[in-house]
Amino acid sequence: MPRLRAEGLFWRDTGSDVIVLDGESSCYLAANESAGLLWKRLSAGATREELATTLREAYDVAADVAERDVAAFLDDLAARNLLAT
């Protein structure tokens, strides 16, 4: 199950976006509405399948599209070393 790194990540929900500061790399990120929704669900412990369901329900997209988008989101977080290992 993917999960956010516990150390050095600071984030705030601004209502329309999620703003993230990676304290380890001193990198600032802004997630758009859909990525912010996934970020909040991931921070609450959602599984990959639950993340895909969240996208399907929020944006009325097909299951394969939601699964592909979740995979891309998680791959991006992993590339930025934001996921726990």
Image: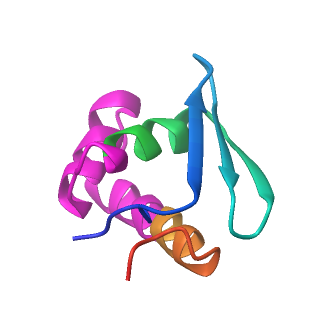
Quarter of the image containing the N terminus? bottom left
Does any portion of residue 82 appear in the rendered image?
yes
Q: Give me the residue at 58% from left, 76% from top.
A: 81
Q: Where is residue 12 in the image (x, y as percent from the top left)?
A: 58, 30
Q: Nearer the viewer, residue 58 or 43?
A: 43
Residue at screen point 29% across, 52% down: 52
Question: Who is closer to the viewer here, 38 or 61?
Answer: 38
Q: Which residue is drawn at 62% across and 20% down?
A: 14
Q: In this view, does 22 lie to the left or right of 56?
A: right
Q: Does the magenta stretch mainly form a helix, a strand or a loop?
A: helix
Q: Is residue 50 magenta?
A: yes
Tell me: 29 left or right of 50.
Answer: right
Q: Where is residue 47 in the image (x, y as percent from the top left)?
A: 20, 59
Residue 57, above or below 22: above
Give coordinates of residue 17: x percent, y percent. 63, 29
Q: What residue is rendered at 79% in x and 60% in y?
A: 27
Check if residue 72 falls in the magenta segment: no
Magenta stretch bounds? 42-71
Is residue 62 at all visible to an observer of this figure?
no
Residue 13: x %, y % from top left: 55, 26
Q: Which of 17 and 4 is in front in this view?
A: 4
Seen from the viewer's position, the closer of residues 44 and 48 is 44
